[in-house]
Amino acid sequence: MCDQTFLAITFGPCDNCSQNKPLMNIYLKNEPINYCSLCVELMACQGLAKGETIHTLKAESETLKTKLEEERAKLHDVELHQVAEKIEALGQFVMKTRRTLKGHGNKVLCVDWCRDKRRIVSSSQDGKVIVWDAYTTNKEHAVTMPCTWVMACAYAPSGCAVACGGLDNKCSVYPLSLDKNENLAAKKKSVAMHTNYLSSCSFTNSDMQILTSSGDGTCALWDVESGQLLQSFHGHSADVLSLNLAPSETGNTFVSGGCDKKANVWDMRSGQNVQSFETHESDINSVKYYPSGDAFATGSDDATCRLYDLRADREVAIYSKESIIFGASSVDFSLSGRLLFAGYNDYTINVWDVLKGTRVAILFGHENRVSTVRVSPDGTAFCSGSWDNTLRIWA
Amino acid sequence: MARDMSDKDILKMELEQLQKEVKNTREPVSKTAKEICEWVEAQSAEDPLIKGVPEDKNPFREKGGCIIT
């Protein structure tokens, strides 16, 4: 996007100090005023403590970052793939498309499995949210959202409701009824309200709370019944694109990734950002906790996926190849965490050996970007959604 | 919200965050990497996508015949 601003220089008495100087035409609370550049600087510095300027803050930030890196580097005594050398290599992979779910009229943006391991909810640019039975490929429910680009959808743990949202800046929950003739849209409940698009949503361990992330740079925890905001999480300096809750046994944390190239780990109860990682070179599109809860993986527009160890507080593996130049849009682990499935913008899905850092398979089949990849709850298959309007189940 | 914050506020936020993080406790990679490897090996035996699922038990096998649910 191009923004062109033309600054016209006028010369005259400053509104503040009354000296004749080149004036900057600025607006304070919608009132046009003319201040000389010195007065504008002084005004901008109000609110900073004595001696603080943007430069000093930046310099301090840089020194702290270097110190943090040094502390982390001290414990970097070995690489993950070196420790993994003794482990047996994986055999040949034969994974193919077992089902193709067709029905969306436009790009599929998000997919989630139900805990019953056979139902899937998917959302699309055309505003439709569809619930499928993956075994039979039948569509069980379909809802039309009032907005396009439904970027987030999630299945409730009970299997009785789905949540979705996108350009409407909201997250809405639809209870699923067994009566096929019932109009689902009538029972819709608006839960979350953000000031920008909803990028991702997830139920916590119950149907009662939802965690959302948004283009407004924040994540938030909401109570479904009342729609009340329970906790908000500030810390990203740009759009948050993805979030993932820690596996239930490991406590109340979640990880988020965004356009500021940072992946942050948050404590859900206090709202505090406990750890932050900034090694990617571009937007982080997807974050996913390792099944044990001690690490998480990210997929980014810089064409790499990375593994971050939470206890060592650093990045421990990069999954990349020179031949892969397109961004990774979505990542997920297999049940044991040995395999990492990553969907890319070059229409392929790469399967990585998490421990050794090597690629074990490339899966072709989609005819456009792969936007989302999710492994089923029992690990028997995974589902991929793509801009070619279809979902594929691979096993 | 991040979009409404001035550069100065964003920098302040980052600075406070960094000050907190420098104090975090960390463990050496040799220890944590080993634990990750052990965890994975213990779980790999049960991972259907690694050990494979016999065709007759795989719910996603090619459709044919009837499935009684």
Image (tube, coloured by chain):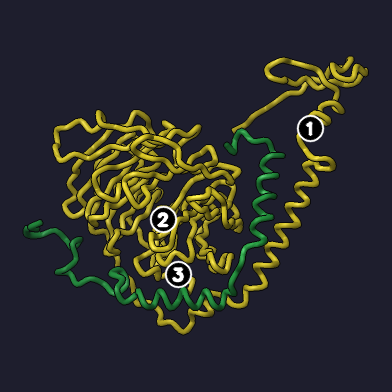
Chain colours: A yellow, B green
Residue plotted at (42% across, 54% down): A245
Residue B51 point in image, percent of width and height: 29, 74
- The chain letter for the residue carrying disc 3 is A
Q: CA distance from mark 2 to mark 3?
A: 15 Å
Residue A60 point in image, percent of width and height: 77, 52
Q: Secondary structure at mark 2?
A: strand
The label on residue A101 is none
In which quadrant is the N terminus of chain A drawn? top right
Q: Earlier in the sequence, mark 1 or mark 2?
A: 1
Would you name the residue on which mark 1 appears?
Answer: A46
Going by the picture, which residue comes out furthest to the bottom?
Answer: A86
Residue plotted at (46% across, 84% down): A86
Q: CA distance from mark 3 to mark 1?
A: 50 Å
Q: Secondary structure at mark 1?
A: loop
- The chain letter for the residue carrying disc 2 is A
Mark 3 or 1: the one toward you: 1
* Amino acid bearing label 2: Gly
Mark 2 or 3: the one toward you: 3
In the foreground, B4 or A88: B4
Residue plotted at (30% across, 36% down): A128
Label 3 and label 1 in one chain: yes
Residue contact at pointers 1 and 2, CB within 8 angstroms? no
Q: Earlier in the sequence, mark 3 or mark 1?
A: 1
Where residue B43 sits, quadrant-wise, is bottom left
Residue A292 point in image, percent of width and height: 42, 67
Would you name the residue on which mark 2 appears?
Answer: A343
Q: Tell whether B54 sits left or right of A246.
A: left
Q: CA distance from mark 1 to mark 2?
A: 48 Å
Label 1 and label 2 in one chain: yes
Residue contact at pointers 2 and 3, CB within 8 angstroms? no
Sort mark 2 into few (<14), some (14-19) or many (20+) by Cα contacts within 10 Å: many
Would you name the residue on which mark 3 appears?
Answer: A354
